[in-house]
Amino acid sequence: MIREYSMENRGKEIKIVGILGGGQLARMTATAAYKLGLQIAILDPAPDSPAQQVTELKVVGPLNDISMIRKVASLSDILTLENEFVDASLLREVESDGVLIYPRADTLGLVQDKLLQKQLLDSNGIRVPRFMAVSEKEDVYKAGETLGWPLVLKARRNGYDGRGNALINGPSSVEDVWRRFEQTRIPLMVEEFVEFKKELAVMVARSSNGEVAVYPVVETIQKNHICHMVKAPAEISPESLENAKEIARKTIEVIDGVGIFGIEMFFLNDERILINELAPRPHNSGHYTIEACVTSQFENHVRAILGLPLGSTSMVLPTAVMVNLLGTRSGPVNIKGLRDALKIPGVSVHIYGKKTTRPGRKMGHVTVLANSIEEALDKATRAAKLISF
Ligand code: ADP
């Protein structure tokens, strides 16, 4: 019976998708996979992680441990990831065991290092902020002379929600910031501080047989470096919307990406677009697609890695707003306000099932579709204010 539900990729029958990481991205990917009749296996250190809660097939252990990756691979027909922090060299080894992994280890190796990522984009004519590698403190002073102040110092790897970044206003603050970052022993880079008008993001999926699907361009609004709100579509000129989509399409080809990718961009006053960074996975800026698009980012990710036809990325109503629900205190979760939020017509609430909360932790999100961005914004912000953890 199960055979009826199986899919194929490169002649391999796919029934179980293994995901490295068990957070909300894996949980929402699981939901999309279940829709297509697949099963999910999860590797995550926390036995009660959001995605471990929704499957029987779980491996509890660290992500950067090859024996654990092999264990979840043995339960699965294909592997994918929900974050970019798994060492690409481990994935290369597992690939050479014959395991199908998408995005491929080589793509991940490029994307998980912000310097390699930017060098590759730059050498392919895709605009990025001006950047330089820095290996010692003196390099930062030199970079300031070349690129101008302020500079943004970035850890080349393992940054998220701005944790690996620091603003250096001028030569007098180099010493302080350098001392803090030096201890992490993670290689560093610097880039010019970009005075952007808006931040944009585009989700783009590319299947293992080369088909590409580009989602609408959205505006992302961050608070304390964490995505706070997404407005779809972004309110920029039709030419700029087209330009952003074209950049996303070109980028996924350049990195030979398979799966869904989030392309974060800076939109400048003169309408130029620079890529800030790439995420080789479903992305917070694409959560609105669950309700707002014919095919969600999660479903197109599953379709892409299985080599199935990609679904339409069209929006079902003209506008959508997504607001993140973040923790505001530390401790066990105690959800309040859900009933009142759900009373607002058209509000979709997603709660990730995390057992504990802490300030800034992504606990869920709210999406509203509407005919006008004002209406979507009003309802989504009202609903988000009502819910607490
Ligand atoms: P992370 O990898 O931790 O998500 P990013 O490099 O995407 O970090 O940066 C997080 C946020 O910091 C961006 O969304 C943007 O608001 C700001 N930022 C990053 N790089 C620059 C830059 N070069 N100039 C101006 N702001 C920046």
Image (cartoon, grey):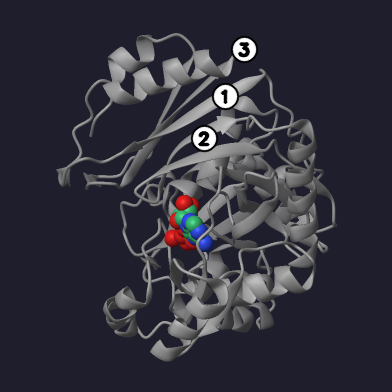
Label 3 vs 2, first from the N-terminus: 2
Say if 232 sits above or below 196 in the image. above
Image spot of residue 41 (x, y percent): 51, 56
Label 1 vs 3, first from the N-terminus: 1
The amino acid beneath tag 1 is Ala
Instruction: Work out whether residue 42 can be spotted.
Output: no
At x 36%, y 9%, the residue is: 343
Element carrying mark 2: strand
Image spot of residue 226 (x, y percent): 39, 48
Disc 2 vs disc 1: Cβ atoms closer than 8 Å? yes
At x 63%, y 33%, the residue is: 234
Q: Residues within 10 Å of mark 1 (few under 14, many from 20)?
A: many
Viewer-closest of 132 and 386: 132
Image spot of residue 206 (x, y percent): 76, 53
In the picture, measured across the screen, residue 30 lies left or right of residue 381, that is right
Alpha carbon distance from label 2 to label 1:
8 Å
Q: Which mark is residue 230?
A: 2
Disc 1 vs disc 3: Cβ atoms closer than 8 Å? no
Instruction: Work out whether residue 32 can be spotted.
Output: yes
Q: Which mark is residue 371?
A: 3
Element carrying mark 3: loop
Of the 4 image quadrants, the one containing the N terminus is: top right
Alpha carbon distance from label 3 to label 2:
16 Å
Give the labeled residue for mark 1: 320
Count of residue discs: 3
Image spot of residue 249 (x, y percent): 79, 52
At x 47%, y 89%, the residue is: 135
Q: Quadrant of residue 269?
A: top right
Say if 274 sits above or below 381 in the image. below
Of the 4 image quadrants, the one containing the C terminus is: top left
In the picture, measured across the screen, residue 172 lies left or right of residue 142, that is left
Q: Quadrant of residue 378?
A: top left
